[in-house]
Amino acid sequence: MIKYNVELNGKTILVTGSPGFIGANLVMRLLKDMTVGHIISFDNMNNYYDVNLKEYRLAEIGKVAANSSVKHTFIKGDLTNKRLIDSMFAEFKPTIVVNLAAQAGVRYSIEHPDVYIESNIVGFYNILEACRHNFVEHLVYASSSSVYGGNKKVPFSVNDKVDNPVSLYAATKKSNELLAHSYAKLYNIPSTGLRFFTVYGPAGRPDMFYYSATKKLSEGKIIQIFNYGNCKRDFTYIDDIVEGIVRVMQGAPEKKNGEDGLPVPPYRVYNIGGGKPENLLDYISTLQEELVRVGVLPTGYDFEGHRELIPMQPGDVPVTYADSEALERDFGFRPTIDIRVGLHFFAEWYKQYYMDKKR
């Protein structure tokens, strides 16, 4: 087991991408768990998807912060603005940094590569430079299961080679890992990368399939199912993701020197996934059942009439499957929330957010 060597209470913690899906849930968890300290939220609030949803998450954070003894500050800005990043570190002096801000989406990267280079490469470089010039106990950053590309060996292990990305998004996430390793080696910055596997849940990203499919079905439209439904995904519920992040935040890689007297990079990477890939058609069926159960869709909805099976899309992969053995070994945790439970919570939230408030 990893030694929990980082105390969260009393610290100033920077969370970038805080109005994002994972970021918002992490900030709310920290505000609830901590009794003293300061959470700095940071994001540029771009319009990659509906900004209203980001505003909603910020409002939810505000509700939790109002009842927390922990201070919360939101800063609107862009990771590519190095001067702003440097001044933020100088003013607030965060000692724990969780970098979740990034341009997400595999397919979007095919048509908009420049956005990914700016946010995921230049932006992350600016965070690394700020960590280099300021004392930071632990840098935790988001990688992705996409780095495994077309690997045929499953489940995907952190010990596998990930040199063949099939999308620019995946390439930028692999680049993040390489950059973090370099800075860990050169400047002794304790860094941990987290490869997330298909995160879902209430107030998630609208571009994710379960969310966009729900919207289309509720509007009577047809949903397209890629690779004719012959896909498997290791779906991970948001609460499991946040639990993994919080545990990892408290266990920074130890600083030590090697036989050559130089620092051994205080650097690690973990998968966070359930280790139980679900067939895409089974996942969709479960989603539809839960949408009927809560009243988003009517009883007797013609599911088959609203499905279209289509070929695999560029940049996509047929299977994701996490080997979370390292996470369980080091932190005693493995995601366990079942898709039916998770999709039920999502369906309930969707009904409240989109349907109930319109009545």
Image: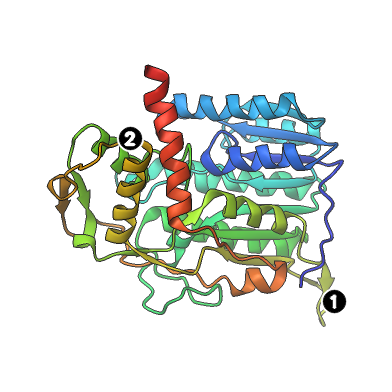
Which residue position holds label 1? 261
Q: Residue 273: where, in percent of width, then height?
A: 52, 63
Compare residues 166 and 62 and report the one nearer the observer: 62
Q: With respect to residue 288, does 259 lie above or below?
A: below
Displayed quadrant of residue 40: top right
Mark 1 secondary-structure assignment: loop
Residue drawn at x 47%, y 54% is 172
Mark number for residue 296?
A: 2
Q: Quadrant of the C terminus?
A: top left
Residue drawn at x 50%, y 29% is 54
Q: Residues within 10 Å of mark 1 (few under 14, many from 20)?
A: few
The answer to whether 66 appears left or right of 300 in the picture is: right
Q: Quadrant of the N terminus?
A: bottom right
Q: With respect to residue 44, does 281 lie above or below?
A: below
- Residue 102 appears in the rendering: yes
Q: Amino acid at mark 1?
A: Gly
> Alpha carbon of mark 1 to alpha carbon of mark 2: how far?
62 Å
Mark 2 secondary-structure assignment: loop
Between disc 1 and disc 2, the foreground one is 2
Q: Residues within 10 Å of mark 2 (few under 14, many from 20)?
A: many
Compare residues 225 and 356 and report the one nearer the observer: 356
Displayed quadrant of residue 220: top left
Q: Residue furthest left?
A: 305
The answer to whether 231 appears left or right of 245 in the picture is: left
